[in-house]
Image (spheres, rainbow, N blue to C red):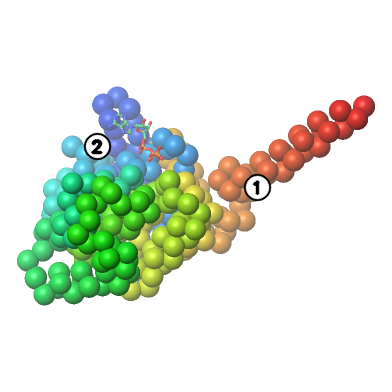
């Protein structure tokens, strides 16, 4: 098992954001966590990364058999987990190249870093073209690519992605998901948090549905895609039907 999160509880003061969440990732997985705004998705990722002081309050997190809960974020990165936060959080005043270099700050193997820089430039040719441009002047899609590229520069075994599709055009969302698939094929395991449930369920092999800090449903994605609740609440399928039904009803009323 690559990552084993067992029964974690995380709070912000009196707000219990995560109330007993367990999830497992095997090498090669793309697993996804779905949930509405405020369900606790980001909090799970931040807890795994050790970004929240004194959290998790309860439960354990193991990475490659080693306890990492309460470990410093820097050590967690060194062990092989990278995090792409929601909203990208790149350094706008630094160039694209400098941002990518920041991603490798925990590494001492210069040759390896050079190789990974080449690899990232191949994934995202636009970053290579714009390597001397200030990151703050990139488009939203390019910034998302930069954020993923920077995370790859740490040469992770596990990549945590928070809402990579947020604010992107449908065409770019497709591109980003294609890149995520390609990264995974190269052997990087992925934990993906998304509100774009359809995309996430299509690329992932397993999914968890999070509501109010608890996992209420989890299964292989092909099963979740057929689940009525998932269809209604996350894929909007029945919702569309009921909107149509309402329009039909209104039209009939007008005729009367
Ligand atoms: P979104 O998709 O909107 O980012 P999410 O599922 O990622 O939502 P979280 O950001 O993990 O949800 O938030 C879970 C809960 O914790 C919410 O009720 C949120 O208001 C609360 N919360 C998040 N960050 C903080 C904070 N720094 N201080 C206090 N409460 C917080």
Q: Which mark is residue 237?
A: 1
CA–CA distance in space, label 2 to label 1:
38 Å
Identify the residue at the far right of this view. Answer: 256
Residue 78 left/right relative to 215: left
Assign a secondary structure to mark 2.
Answer: loop
**Residue found 29% across the figure and 24% down from its top:** 14
Residue 227 or residue 58, whichever sits in front: 227
Q: What residue did someone put label 2 on?
A: 57
Residue 148 in the image, given as x and y percentages of width and height? 30, 58
Residue 174 or residue 156, whichever sits in front: 174
**Residue found 45% across the figure and 57% down from its top:** 172
Residue 86 or residue 235, whichever sits in front: 86
Q: State whether residue 72 is above or below residue 243.
A: below
Rendering quarter of residue 160: bottom left
**Residue found 18% across the figure and 37% down from its top:** 53
Assign a secondary structure to mark 1.
Answer: helix
Q: Is residue 161 visible?
A: no
Q: Image quadrant of ligand 1?
A: top left
Q: Is residue 87 visible?
A: yes
């Amino acid at each position: 098992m690559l990552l084993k999160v067992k029964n974690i509880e995380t709070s912000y003061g009196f707000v219990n954001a995560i109330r007993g969440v367990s999830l497992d990732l095997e090498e090669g997985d793309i697993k996804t966590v779905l949930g509405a705004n405020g369900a606790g998705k980001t909090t799970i990722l931040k807890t795994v990364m050790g970004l929240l002081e004194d959290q998790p309050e309860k439960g354990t997190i193991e990475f490659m058999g080693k306890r990492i809960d309460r470990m410093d974020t820097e050590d967690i990165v060194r062990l092989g987990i990278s995090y792409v936060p929601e909203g990208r959080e790149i350094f706008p005043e630094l160039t694209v190249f400098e941002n990518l270099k920041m991603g490798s700050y925990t590494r001492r193997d210069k040759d390896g870093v050079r190789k990974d820089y080449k690899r990232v430039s191949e994934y995202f040719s636009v970053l290579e073209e714009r390597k001397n441009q200030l990151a703050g002047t990139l488009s939203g899609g390019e910034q998302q690519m930069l954020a993923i590229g920077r995370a790859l520069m740490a040469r992770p075994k596990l990549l945590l992605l928070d809402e990579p599709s947020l604010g992107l055009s449908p065409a770019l969302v497709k591109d980003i998901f294609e890149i995520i698939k390609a990264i995974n094929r190269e052997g990087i395991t992925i934990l993906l948090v998304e509100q774009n449930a359809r995309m996430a369920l299509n690329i992932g092999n397993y999914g968890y549905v999070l509501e109010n800090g608890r996992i209420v449903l989890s299964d292989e994605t092909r099963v979740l895609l057929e689940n009525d609740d998932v269809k209604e609440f996350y894929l909007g399928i029945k919702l569309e039907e009921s909107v149509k039904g309402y329009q039909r009803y209104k039209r009939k009323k007008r005729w009367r």
